[in-house]
Image: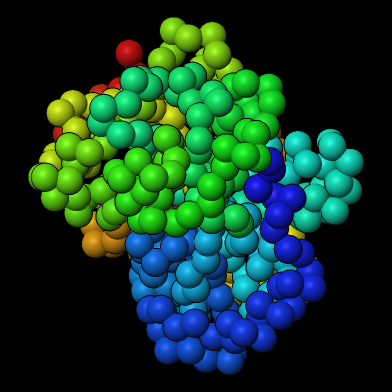
Amino acid sequence: MNALRFFPFQAWLAALVLVLGCLPIAVQCQTDSHRIVTGPQTSTQIQIGEDISRYAAQPAGISLQVLPSKGSVENVQRLRYEPRVRLALVQADVYRAYTNLMNSGNSAAGKLIQPLRVVLPLFDDEIHVVVRADSPLASLRDIRGKRINIGPVGSGTAMTATTLYQTMFGEPIPEELISTDTNEIALGKLANQSGPEVVFVVSGQPVGLFTNIKPSVEQHFKLLRFDASSPIEQTALYVYQAAKIEHKSYPNWLAEDLPGLSTKTLLVTYDYNTPETRQMLVQLVQSLCSQFQTLQAEGHTKWKQVRLDQPPLGRGWQYYAPTKNALDQCIKERTPPARSTCSRDEALLGFCTRAR
């Protein structure tokens, strides 16, 4: 199964817009507000979206409504088709998933993904692969042929679970082994041995779902580790990055740091050409740049992973040129000019450092 095959397209989304209309989260619903689609209510993504609205959009006089979603796949669709949605949080591996679908003959997938542009890479989404504490499974390669809950169709978790499995084993997850329950329902079934053997949860650590685990409950579950010495698991590094799921993120659950995998969450927009939209996005990133220290100090802890210097992107992704130029200029203005020469007296008085 490929999660993308089961996600409805234009017709379904037209109905979705009529139903959703406005879903206020951090700000009051306004018909003229811009919108950012994020993730589930308990996710790191929605908190990041609220930070962008509060600390970047509001100081710039921009009304940015924060909307929940199932995750990356839904966000790509809504960014393309839903009115007023100008930004989305999207996992970097979505490009690989859509490209795989395009290469299998679905030309619509390519048309949908190619106009997307990155405003800024944000944070790492750790891939939490959960099994029962008494399960014989130990590392990621052990999930082959097991009953797997990939998360709701349209979610970033479902996309990552199916893409990771395909990457490691060269074949899709057999459809009869897949379930698509929410994380909460799936973990309940896992604890009761009434459903999946493996549950995927993809979100930036610490995930609220796990930080709230009570000392008596965490004994039911464990996380699978990424084994870098395994040739099968090494193939995952073509798409994902090695990471650590840290003890400090889940002190009631993990006894030590655990090697794992992650994918980057990106702040994404469309390749807009209209002057009004371009200007709004430029003003937003200028405000984000000027408020960056506040975001890191008062926003979600994941802001400490964010870099404004726009590092290289994964294969297929491109930066949105207007916001890239604005961030480049902002960084330049914030960075003191380098001194090419320095007198001895200036160096002695601490104004510059002489080259050796």
Residue at image x 40%, y 50%? 186
Residue at image x 53%, y 51%? 180
Q: Nearer the viewer, residue 274 or 110?
A: 110
Quarter of image, res 323: bottom right
Q: Position of residue 1 (x, y in %)?
A: 68, 41
Q: Residue furthest bottom?
A: 31
Q: Nearer the viewer, residue 140 or 100?
A: 140
Asked if residue 34 can be seen in this view, the reply is: yes
Q: Nearer the viewer, residue 344 or 218?
A: 218
Asked if residue 48 can be seen in this view, the reply is: no
Q: Residue furthest left?
A: 215
> For the C terminus, which image quadrant?
top left
In the rendered structure, the answer to whether residue 5 lies left or right of residue 154 reads right
In the rendered structure, the answer to whether residue 96 lies left or right of residue 156 reads right
Q: Position of residue 275 (x, y in %)?
A: 73, 75
Way the structure is coloured: rainbow
Residue at image x 13%, y 50%? 214
